[in-house]
Image (cartoon, rainbow, N blue to C red):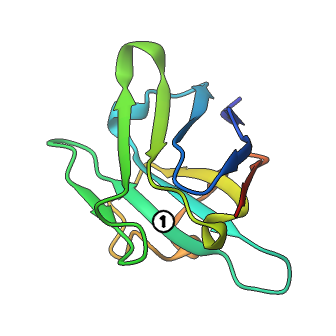
Amino acid sequence: QVNLVESGGGSVQTGESLTISCKASGFTIGRYCMAWFRQVPGKEREGVAGIYIGEGYTYYADSVRGRFTISRDNAKSTLYLKMDSLKPDDTAVYYCAADQSTVREWYEDYEYRIWGQGTQVTVSS
């Protein structure tokens, strides 16, 4: 059974850093496209960062480029999102997602069939 479990969320102050993790089970993450999304109440889920299979090209939303870094450790079956210079607007529930196919638009949630349960990140001013 395939499964994704996020962890590492919490409350931080503006300008601080936080790294969240997504532990995968039941599949080999190196063979999957993976991404981080976030959602706040009343808004659509937003693609934050994506990483492709193979050479592992990475992609970022304009709102986080230069501040967030997506990476994965295949040996640990874990996806990471390192978040620096956090802002209150980064407050959301963060989800990891995966799909075995080569997604065309990494930022679209319909491209991914495997989802975690989410972890809350709160940034206060």
Instruction: Say which residue appears at 34% left-offset and 37% top-offset.
Output: 31
Horizontal placement of 104 versus 11: left or right?
A: left
Q: Is residue 56 above or below residue 93?
A: above
Q: How far across and how far down the image is residue 95, in percent?
A: 66, 53
Q: Is residue 34 above or below residue 47?
A: above
Classed neighbour count for the residue bearing mark 1: other residues with Cα under 10 Å, few (<14), some (14–19), many (≥20): many
- Please, what secondary structure does the residue beneath circle 1 have? strand
Q: Which residue is mark 1?
A: 48
Q: How far across and how far down the image is residue 69, in percent?
A: 35, 48
Q: Quadrant of residue 90?
A: bottom right
Q: Quadrant of the C terminus?
A: bottom right
Instruction: Say which residue appears at 35% left-offset and 38% top-offset.
Output: 71
Seen from the viewer's position, the closer of residues 57 and 31 is: 57
Instruction: Say which residue appears at 60% left-offset and 27% top-offset.
Output: 23
Instruction: Say which residue appears at 71% left-offset and 40% top-offset.
Output: 9
User: Which residue sits furthest right?
Assistant: 41
User: Which residue sits furthest front?
Assistant: 125
User: Which residue sits furthest left?
Assistant: 55
User: Which residue sits furthest top?
Assistant: 75
Q: Is residue 57 above or below residue 43?
A: above
Seen from the viewer's position, the closer of residues 39 and 84 is: 84
Q: Quadrant of the N terminus?
A: top right
